[in-house]
Image: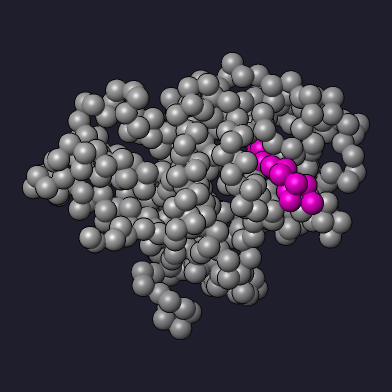
Amino acid sequence: MRPELTMEPWLERLSTAIARHGPARDQDGAFPRQAFAELHARGLLSRPSAEDGTMRALLQLLAAVGRGDLSVGRIFEGHVNASFLIERYGTPAQARFFADIAAGGGIFGVWNTDDPAARLRIEDGVLVGRKLFASGVDGLSHAIVTIGETDGRRMIVIPLRDLPVDRSWWRPAGMRASGSHAVDLTGLHVDPGWMLGAAGDYLEQPWFSAGSIRFLAVQVGGMHAVFDTAVAHLRRTDRAAHPHQSHRLARMGVAVETGHLWLARSADAWARAAADPTDPWASDFLAGSANAARLAIETAAMAVLEDAERAIGAAGLIAPHPFERLMRDLRTYLRQPDPDGAAAAFGKAIAEGAWSPGVPDRKEVS
């Protein structure tokens, strides 16, 4: 018998363990505690690193989590981002403090989106305002929130205890368990030890723009799950060998692999920039690669959704068929901010010679 071709076995097991709880959390919208218990049991909450040499492995992990459940992937990506920001901009004492919390199962988030009617600010040492898209609020221990200052956005790490949460705002088509509610931080006294880094650090380039490769990895995992579901359905209904279905499987396979290849390409660009942060070429190439990956992965994911829907047919649009939920989740998660701006920035990088296809290192473009 031919063996099944799979990714690393432990990542396969992780995806399967997380996926087990997805349907129930889609129904009730509750924080996915069982999935995060799986991550904690495997030691994956403790200081997930994005330092030079580890980005490929990190993106593979994020893809595996997204393949299990995109809502879990969204929250876990926020935890990874927060851990990266604390490691990069925090004091040694802050890094140790939050590493201990993560080791004990604490989960972090990053909330940047202000309520336009109540932008977050500090008045006399007290926070005033609300954050929208506060993903994971019902299960996080801490969140990094940003405030706008004259010299740049400032990061504050706040503990999440007894905050007013408006759950009526979050009524999405998909990603229900990510719990991206509205949170009112008004009245919270800011401890000086909560301040993280300096004003402007949050938007430091290329790391701010290039950080998109983390959510792209989760999206690739979601695309992979749609592909898995389509393949399983066609096998179960004995239609996989039909020539039209074979073409759809071929296109979906190419699209999913394209997503994984763009992750590897972007990870290499990250490692190059991290190895020499003073090299402007490496920074520009990383930013260009991240924007290119955004365009390529969104295009590939939409193509997979279209082919999977045609392959499965109307049955896939009726719950509890797994495609119905996966389709809603992936379409929702693909709507990341400013895709047109990312595409325009990528085109500008090409026009200015900062990015070119097939470039392994600086020598090839000099």
What residue is drawn where x is 26% and y is 53%? Answer: 253
Query: Is 338 in front, or is 336?
Result: 336
80 with respect to 328 (left or right): right
Q: Is residue 181 left or right of residue 199?
A: left
The structure residue drawn at horizontal position 40% and vertical position 37%, both measured from the top left corner, is 330
Q: Which residues are magenta?
A: 100-116
Visible residue check, residue 267: yes
In the image, residue 106 lies in the stretch drawn in magenta: yes
Q: How is the image coloured?
A: one colour
Question: The C terminus lies in which quarter of the figure?
Answer: bottom left
Quarter of the image for residue 106 reads: top right
- Identified at 69% across, 53% down, the residue is 46
Picture coordinates of residue 233, whole percent (x, y): 24, 38
Give how far across and how far down residue 239 sits, in percent. Answer: 13, 41
**Residue in the foreground of this view, choosing between 261 and 273:** 261
The quadrant of the picture occupied by the N terminus is bottom left
Q: Residue at x 61, y 69 (%)?
A: 52
* Residue 280 visible in the snapshot: no
**Observer-nearest of 88 and 207:** 88
Indicate the position of residue 191 as horizontal and vertical percent values: 90, 39
Residue 166 spot, x, y in % from top left:
65, 19
Residue 152, placed above or below residue 178: below
Single out the residue that lies furthest toward the front: 1
Image vertical order of residue 362 relative to residue 205, above or below: below
Residue lying at the far top of the rendered structure: 168
Say if the magenta span includes residue 41.
no
Q: How many numbered dots are placed on residues in this image? A: 0
Judge left or right: residue 35 versus residue 124: left
